[in-house]
Amino acid sequence: MHRRYFPEDFIWGAATASYQIEGAYNEDGKGESIWDRFSHTPGKILNGDTGDVACDHYHRFREDVKLMKELGLDSYRFSISWPRVLPEGKGQVNEKGLDFYKQLVDQLLKAGIDPAITLYHWDLPQALQEKGGWANRDTAKYFVEYANLIFKELGDVVPLWITHNEPWVVSFPGHAFGEHAPGIKNYQTALQVAHNLLLSHGMAVQSFRQLGLPGKIGITLNLTPVYPFSDNEADQKACDLQDAFINRWFLDPIFEGSYPEELHQIYRKKVGEFIIKNDDLEIINQKIDFLGINYYLRLVVKHNPDYNIFGVETVKPEGREYTEMGWEVYPEGLYDLLIRLHKDYAPEALYITENGAAYQDQIDADGRVHDQKRIAYLKAHLKNAHRAIEAGVPVKGYYIWSLMDNFEWAFGYSKRFGLIYINYDNQQRILKDSAYWYRTIIAKNYIED
Ligand SMILES: N=[N+]=NCCCCNC(=O)[C@@H]1[C@H]2[C@H](O)[C@@H](O)[C@H](O)[C@@H](CO)[C@@H]12
């Protein structure tokens, strides 16, 4: 067996997000979020599930930190619920909400686990949505005020900061397709949202620098390598367009200070303009300390003039494996993506801030969860991350999505991604076989293939 050793200082982590695990949706002064509103709207979430209780992490965080310590995690990535600390999104601070996060960070530090904070993982205060939400440029200003509050409270003890999680998903599923909160179906609005999210990211980085904080700051993007169905020119062109739609529309402004021109032209013609003010792109193009990558799947596309505004149709190759989300298992795509990012954008550092899979997990007669498929998925992706590191890509850490089963957005609790199984009837936590497997990987710092 070949041992693939990871760098001595490689960070082994796991990730979650506030709305997906905390529950206590209206407790201790927390304000309503757009996901509270969306999940309480009939027909939006499978089985009518909501995040009202979720994994009850708000009350059980001490037990959960103990489990993280049992796994030997170096770092734990979680997000802060903006309306839990600022119920109206701005103005009056909810001290009990802030206190929850200060206690969580304190428990993590006592357990020897580095906190990695995501400032925005989709749960915008509903009060700001009433004022237009991310389509309103003022929300960028309110985001920086919120970020500054957290920076000042936790900035001296938290080493890793992520401004936004997956602005593409916030923009398009949330504002063009209507599948995510706030459930808007307006492509032009989605483009303005994407721009204002990027602007708020740049402004928050500037503020972080001005505060002179010791940690590192970056952004997490869902990046999906795109492959042409055939090598004919039309399919290759479709591939380039899909790559611009999902990946470059965020990578280019952040790393180059400009939007992909060809796609911008298509949008001007077919969708309409969105407002960019004079030095916006200069603000967005702030130097970041690392790029966070959420990698789950690849896409294979072909040209189809009738399919959508781009004439791009995604296809599902035969004979491949798919997860419960219908996403193709394609570990090589992580290698290809890392090599491309290193070549085209050369981030100072990269963290895989999410990678994982949903499978049909069940508790067996022995009371255990034998999730062998998940172990195979994770091992194959770690192998490809290691290949990229050997090729010189500065990958500094890996966070499994997710630490525990949780509220999977429009799919509710029907999809399980966790290393830890959650029995939602009694909130019992059960370490799956993948958790025990991950604990040995962290302890040995190598995988065998
Ligand atoms: N149309 N459409 N939209 C599909 C969105 C594709 C990419 N989804 C993600 O990357 C989300 C990321 C998220 O951070 C986490 O909160 C989610 O729980 C995981 C699992 O789903 C992944």
Image (cartoon, grey):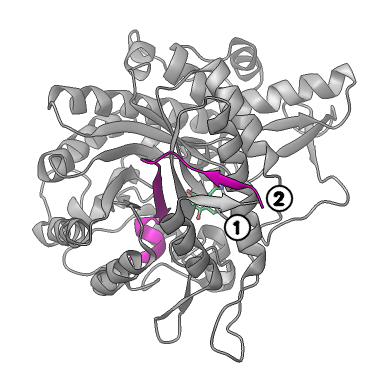
Q: Residues within 10 Å of mark 1 (few under 14, many from 20)?
A: many
- Magenta highlight range: 1-25
> Which mark is first along the chain, 2 or 1?
2
Residue 137 lies, in percent from the top left, at 33, 27
- Classify 63 as above or below 164: below
Q: Nearer the viewer, residue 149 or 177?
A: 149
Q: Amino acid at mark 2?
A: Val
- Residue at coordinates 85% horizontally, 30% vertically from top-left? 304
Q: Nearer the viewer, residue 295 or 53?
A: 295
Picture coordinates of residue 193 (x, y %)? Answer: 44, 32
Does residue 154 appear left or right of residue 327 in this picture?
A: left
Residue 186 drawn at (x, y percent): 56, 36
Q: Are marks 1 and 2 in contact (CB under 8 Å)?
A: yes
Q: Secondary structure at mark 1?
A: loop
Nearest to the observer: residue 97 or residue 36: 97
- Mark sitting on residue 391: none
Residue carrying label 1: 357
Query: Any magenta on residue 418?
Result: no
Disc 2 marks which residue?
A: 329
Within 10 angstroms of label 2, few (less than 14), some, or many (20 or more) residues? Answer: some
